[in-house]
Amino acid sequence: MDTTVYQNTSPGQQSGPPAIAVRARELAKVYGDGASAVHALAGVDVDFTAGAFTAIMGPSGSGKSTLMHLLAGLDSASSGHAYLGETDVTTLDDDALTRLRRDRVGFVFQSFNLLPMFTAEQNITLPLELAGAKVDRQWFDTLVQALGLGQRLTHRPSELSGGQQQRVAIARALITKPEVVFADEPTGNLDSRSGAEVLSFLRRSVRELGRTIIMVTHDPTAAAYADRVVLLADGRIAGDIADPTPESVLAGLDALRQLDEPVATTGAINTARTAGL
Ligand SMILES: Nc1ncnc2c1ncn2[C@@H]1O[C@H](COP(=O)(O)OP(=O)(O)OP(=O)(O)O)[C@@H](O)[C@H]1O
């Protein structure tokens, strides 16, 4: 487990080429077989820079969750490779995958996934307890302060708002200083104000604490907090937006939809959208 003091490793501040935290090479996933086979990922090549906040977006069913699960070692690939640093995740056995997920990866889920009988502090330090590792109090205090949880540490999840629960979940994901945090729709269950707080912290954790975050989201406003948006369509990389804004993300998603739509229906669908249908 990494115990170094973190420095910001934003791409712009490095002298050499930026380090790559996570890579996919010809990564493919097929569910089922024969006529009913679903090619959820159809050969994806993509690099995720260390010290950057990257969002993955795309239409429903485009393969976002599948890509994240394969990169994080939560599901097995049909072919191709996924690397965390220099480790090929696709070749690890179950024990090695369990250790990799425990020691090198953090997760934030839409549904928080906190343990109800534990306090906020106990939830945050749980990954260290499970690994038999000591709590780095300085890092714990840094996270608690940055996430505004100082007054909430003795509360149980049922005594916390949704936004507070998600901030506890983020502290839990970061407490082991993982090489990468995978966030799956982290604001999906939050109102817009709590969502904005969570996203601001995720961005701060990258800019000020040198973390690496890969986030799946449906929300262009959420994606605009990232340094970069990778677009997926039909299980393939379909676009890449640097320094995204809500407008540039929406335009990218619209371009994908238009590729999908038969020419004759595009105008009608655009009209329907304008009408709010
Ligand atoms: N366990 C499974 N068995 C069969 N098909 C699956 C399974 N999981 C996903 N799929 C299919 O794989 C494709 C990609 O699914 P995935 O969940 O990765 O998409 P997504 O972009 O995350 O979608 P959404 O935005 O709706 O969550 C879809 O067609 C989906 O139906």
Image (cartoon, rainbow, N blue to C red):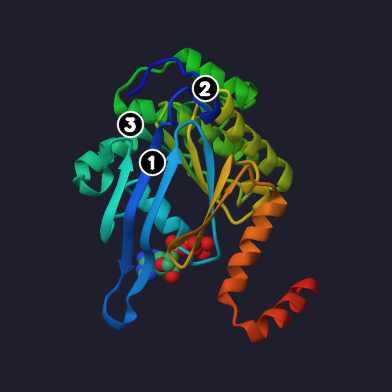
Image point (57%, 52%), residue name: 217
Residue 103 shows which numbered tag? 3
Image point (40%, 58%), residue name: 66
Q: Which quarter of the image is occupied by the N terminus?
A: top left
The x and y percentages for residue 48 are 44, 41
Q: Is residue 23 left or right of residue 116?
A: left
Asked if the residues shown at circle 2 and circle 3 are in contact, with their CB atoms under 8 angstroms apart, the answer is no
Q: Residues within 10 Å of mark 3 (few under 14, many from 20)?
A: some
Tell me if residue 160 can be seen: no
Mark 1 vs 2, N-terminal side: 2
The x and y percentages for residue 44 are 38, 57
Q: Quadrant of ligand 1?
A: bottom left
Name the amino acid type tagged 2.
Asn
Nearest to viewer (mark 3 / mark 1)? 1
Q: CA distance from mark 2 to mark 3?
A: 21 Å
Image point (54%, 38%), residue name: 53
Above or below, 90 against 180 in this view is: below
Q: CA distance from mark 1 to mark 2?
A: 18 Å
Name the amino acid type tagged 3.
Asp
Residue 227 shows which numbered tag? none
Q: What residue sits right under mark 2 in the picture?
A: 8
At numbered mark 2, what does the secondary structure look like: helix, strand or loop? Answer: loop
Above or below, 167 against 246 in this view is: above
Image point (65%, 86%), residue name: 264
The x and y percentages for residue 84 are 33, 39
Name the amino acid type tagged 1.
Val
Tell me if residue 101 can be seen: yes
Nearer-the-camera pick, 172 or 225: 225
Q: What residue sits right under mark 1 in the picture?
A: 22
